[in-house]
Amino acid sequence: YADRLRAAFARDGWVTIRRAVEPATMESLMAQIARELEAPSIAAESGEASASLDRPDTWPSGGSRRVLEVTPPGDAAHWAELVASPRLVAALDAILGELGWELPVNAAAPTDGGRVPVRHWYAPVAFPDERGGCDDPAGSWAPVNRRGERWRGWHVDIGPGFDTGAARTSEGHPFQGAVVLLLGSGWSPPAQYS
């Protein structure tokens, strides 16, 4: 397993670790993101907006941004469970070397409602777009940015704590071995865990 994973990461620059966290951990994390989306406890870095996942009338519409950012505080139990997940730990050990990595979480929410000093994790929540999203009438797919502009959606993220004014490249930074993306799109507990 480790050799195949390491080879795939070296070849492609990314790997997928399915079921990296337990369903209960994911469910708790998704619930936190929904709560934070509705009433943020940490100020967002890109725009100030909120919405309720259960109330479409609160969702972005018209010409507004379709992606709202949530910076969840890292003090809930599911963050410790995520960082200690055996599947995730085994994958990171295989790719970066046993215990050759760290996976910090966000600080607790500041009492003044401001930002955390370093944003280690954030959750971009994308909402439907009545303008057609990333599909055009001819049925071809194209990336879009947060404002629905076609062919403008791809970008290179920097790691937490790095200079945001520095040039971004697809090679990344020598101190950054991997970026962990936890995808929750369309997530629901698998039948065997229900």
Image: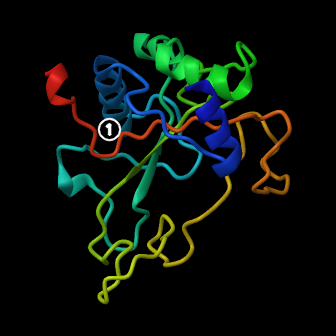
Secondary element at tag 1: helix
Front-most of residues 35 and 4:
4
Instruction: Look at the image and tell me whether residue 14 can be seen.
Output: yes
Q: As displayed, is residue 14 above or below residue 104?
A: below
Answer whether residue 110 is visible to the viewer in this image.
no
Q: Is residue 113 left or right of residue 26?
A: right
In the image, taking residue 87 as reference, residue 3 lies left or right, namely right
Residue at 69%, 19% in the rendered image: 102
Q: Residue under circle 1?
A: 38
| Image location (x, y in percent) of residue 52 | 25, 43
The quarter holding residue 186 reads top left
Compared with 102, 44 (above or below) is below
Q: How many marks?
A: 1
Residue occupying the point 54% across, 67% down = 153
> Furthest residue to the bottom?
138
The N terminus, quarter of image: top right
Q: Where is residue 179 in the image (x, y as percent from the top left)?
A: 64, 38
| Three-letter code, disc 1 | Glu
The image's colouring method is rainbow
